[in-house]
Amino acid sequence: MTQKPTVKAWSLLLALSLIWGSSFILIKKGLLGLTPFEVGSLRILFASIFLLPFVIRNLKKVKRHQVKYLVSIGFLGSFIPAFLFAIAQTRLESSITGVLNAMTPIFTMLVGLFVYKQQQSPRVFVGVFVGFLGAATLVMAGSGGELSNFNFYAFFVVLATIMYALNLNIIKYHLQELRSMTITSISLAFVGPIAAVQLVFFSDFPTRVMEVEGVLEATGYILTLGVVGTAIALIIFNKLVNLTDPVFTSSVTYIIPIVAVMWGVLDGEVLLLSHILGIVAILAGVYVANSSKRKA
């Protein structure tokens, strides 16, 4: 039976929305001095280092059959999306990226339906259809806002939301007995070393960080993103999954676009008519699908 959201759950949802809604502007600022692969690597590395003290304490709580799920969460919930979002924002405004991220609840429902055989109301499919129309509008809207322009980089965000949906369901159905700190710290411990190797041996970041103007400042933005927007946010996120259910937790994406758009406008980004239509369609689709009564 799905747990009814408590005041604590709603408070955590709001905090998570504010943190993750601000992550897109931090990525944008980080890209002013760093490459997308440096942004992704630094984000994961900072997050894993921050949580390293908790790994040894929590490692003994993990059973052998849970290791494969924790590795999957490390890649699907953190590592790969960190690079996908950074790549996407080289050609997408931070506000639009934040709105496309609202596709997560829709994919969460589809994964629950097709992978975990969770029955869904017909309204879910109506919401999915409307949400996809909104996503298609944003994909077809280029920087000038005309629908004739095709923005391929939006697909990087869509792919990341699919991975988030898989991640949500894995946590709910396979790691329910583990605490959020255990899931977060150990999953990041698996991918942190990979990020470090990529940063040290496959980029010139070590030589540029103290020599090239703007790189150190950009690194500071990603440090904030890694510690607050990844490590601390994932702890809150995983706690929410344990307290409620995947769909409620993924509803964080209702508020994320609002925060992301506000930051974008403050930073000089312009929302055109096609963007607004896409935003409204996505949020309407998520609302319709998520408001449906679901059968366990």
Image (cartoon, grey):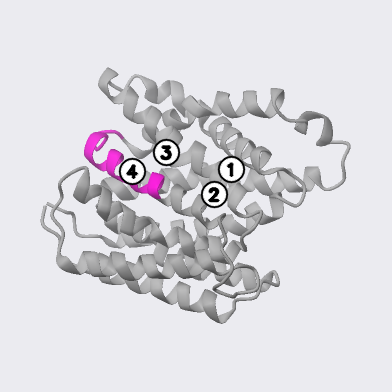
Residue 169 counted in the magenta span:
yes
Q: Quadrant of residue 35?
A: top right
- The residue to which callout 3 is attached is 76
| Front-most of residues 245 and 120 | 120
The 10 Å Cα crowd at callout 1, few under 14, some 14 to 19, many 20 or more, is many
User: What is the C-alpha distance between the residues marked 1 and 2?
Assistant: 6 Å
Amino acid residing under circle 3? Leu
Give the side of residue 119 with respect to residue 56, left or right: left
Image x and y of residue 235, in percent: 42, 43
Q: Are marks 2 and 4 in contact (CB under 8 Å)?
A: no
> Decide: marks 2, 3 in contact (CB < 8 A)?
no
Q: Which residue is mark 1?
A: 226
Residue 101 against residue 193 in the figure, above or below:
below
The image quadrant of residue 287 is bottom left
Q: CA distance from mark 4 to mark 1?
A: 22 Å
Q: Position of residue 273 (x, y in %)?
A: 55, 81
Which residue is denoted by mark 2 in the rendering? 229
Labels 3 and 4 touching (C-beta < 8 A): yes
Q: Nearer the viewer, mark 3 or mark 1?
A: 3
* Dot placed on the residue nearer the N-terminal end, 3 or 4: 3
Q: Which residue is mark 4?
A: 166
Say which label, 4 or 1, has the lower sequence index: 4
Name which residue type carries label 4.
Leu
Q: Residue furthest front?
A: 148
Choose top left, top right, bottom left or bottom right for residue 59.
Answer: top left
